[in-house]
Image: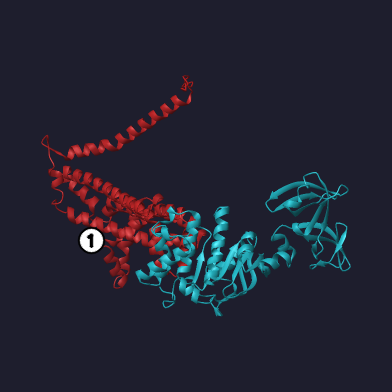
Chain colours: A red, B cyan
Amino acid sequence: MTATLPTTVAPETGRRPRRRGAGAWRVVTLAVLGLYFLVPIAASVWYSSRSNGALTAEFYTGIPSAPGFAEAFGRSLVLAVLTVVLSLLLMLPTMVLVDLRLPRLRPTVEILTLLPLVLPPIALVVGVRSVLAWAPDYFYGTPLAEAFFALQEPSLPWILVLVYVVLALPFVYRALDAGIRSVDLRTLTEAARSLGASWPRVLVGVVLPVLRTSVLNAAFLTLALVLGEYTIASILGFQTFPTWIVEVSGSQPQLSVSVSVLSLVVTWGLLLLISALDRRRAGKDS
Amino acid sequence: MTTTPDRPAGVEALRDTPGVGVQLVGLTRRYGDVLALDGLDLDIAGGEFLALLGPSGCGKTTALRAIAGFERPDDGQVLVDGRDVTGTPPAKRDMGMVFQAYSLFPNLTVAENVGYGLQVRRRPAKERKARAAELLELVGLAANAGRYPHQLSGGQQQRVALARALAVAPKVLLLDEPLSALDAQVRVQLREEIRRIQLELGITTVFVTHDQAEALSVADRVGVLRAGRLEQVASPDELYERPATAFVAEFVGTMNRIPATRTEGGVELMGVRRPAVGDVPVSGDVVALVRPESLLVRADAAGAGRVVTRTFSGASTRLAVALPDGAEVVVDVASADSQQLTPGTAVTVTPAERPVLVGAV
């Protein structure tokens, strides 16, 4: 016996063309956004890879030996790592404490951490500069004055780390908050405590691994923020990677653009590396 | 940090160590205006399996958390083996706890989870592995040692949590509604398994639940809590057969509330007189509290009752019977004797010849 396949065709409904239209919009939106991001990058690559009308890589190969590059880039990396570590040391225990013991403080902490977004960096840096100018004189002859000088040491300006920690607060808070809300931290920490673990051990051995994706996200956002921050470093008179780029752009514009392109690639590379590490870990777990 | 580094771990250690007693003395805990524990006194014998039963908000979990050290009582003491541990942090109490929510560390394998407490106590890796294998064998999950928590079912996760709690050879095992997230069949299976393990190891166990069937089926004694106070602590049989208060009578099992009249030396209900028990006035209107199996029903064309529904549940059948005054009672009868008692049948209902618990109206 053979079955007869139905030959009737479902009548056209109004849904399909609408979906097609929505798909088209999606493509257009993505294309516009893509062009918005890619055109300047492509133009930068084009500009930095041509010399006298011919293709060249000299502006890229010349980056490591460019005067001041290694120093500025190294300093920015150190600042970024210190900022990441300090931000996490400050925020992770605070947020765990708020989640477990002081949930009523959550809105207050949220508002406090969002302040850097509404406070213009210029206002922040002017305030910081005033304090730095006033404090050493005021505390002259005391260890506090020495501390203020140490904060402004040009080779490693700790004052930038402190300011960057403040600027990174909204990003670190958001990233960690998303992670904390997605797990039952109370039960996990209590389970570890009942098994004899001390609080530091609970934080390092239980909380940190559970929140590793959030911690990585927070670290990456902070890293990107510090590697790209210009205003504060410039106004306070420190040389970092972004201020160096601006400095060389006057005398060697193509080199500065090639460095910008490379920094973009490095940032994206870091992002991919972090997400690959996270995926590998997740894969290992499963 | 180590708690008691020389304390032996594992199943053998638990078998060899007699269970320790736990005493709660005048335990009080307030949350703002709410009194969660109101001077709770409780004495748990060594090796005993005690269930704390009560409705939501009665304070049973607060009491358990106070024993574990996660709640600091406003007043009163927690004594373990005669030693006051009220101010001792949870990490130093040597107690194993299984939580209501799944609490396995997601980044660790099953074996690593079970060995976590031993790792905290800095036991060698070889010993941790051996203890984990031993305990996983005990809970029937030896084949899952290398898996991660998300690869296990809810029941398996709670079994691992139990093995993890037992791995450190705790003095007391605390179970905070560990079965409530599981489906009915797994709940029954796991509660029997918990009881089997508890009997095998002889460990003092406190089990918090709001499910009376769970409490009555596994515990040596059941403590019924209401508004932070113990209404009664007794064996399941005694709790069911001789409830101390009307609240216990109605909370544990099904109970009919039948209008009755207190008379000299007894109580009159459904036209018959029975001996009365309970703390009630000497005369006047009262409520008789009668279990479904303590009512007798027979088909009677002249009877004033009418069978409303008939629910078959294997060996017994539950009948809902409407009485002439509009009240409805439920009666349990042997299924073999209930063939004629279909809905609409006229019946006569009488209380069995035994003392009847009475309460105020």
Q: Is residue B296 visible?
A: yes
Q: Nearer the viewer, residue A28 or A138?
A: A28
As drawn, A107 above or below B121: above
Q: Quadrant of residue A261?
A: top left
Q: Is residue A213 left or right of residue A75?
A: right
Residue at the bottom extreme of this rendering: B82
Q: Position of residue B9 (x, y in %)?
A: 44, 73
- Crowding near the residue tagged with mark 1, few <14, some 14–19, many ≥20 C-alpha atoms within 10 Å: some
Q: Circle 1 is placed at which residue position?
A: A154
Q: Position of residue B14 (x, y in %)?
A: 49, 73
Image point (33%, 60%), residue name: A85
Q: Is residue A167 visible?
A: no
Image point (41%, 27%), residue name: A20
| Chain letter, disc 1 residue | A
Identify the amino acid type marked 1: Pro
For label 1, the SS is: loop
As drawn, B9 above or below A163: below
Image point (34%, 52%), residue name: A278
Q: Is residue B247 left or right of residue B350?
A: left
Residue at the top extreme of this rendering: A7
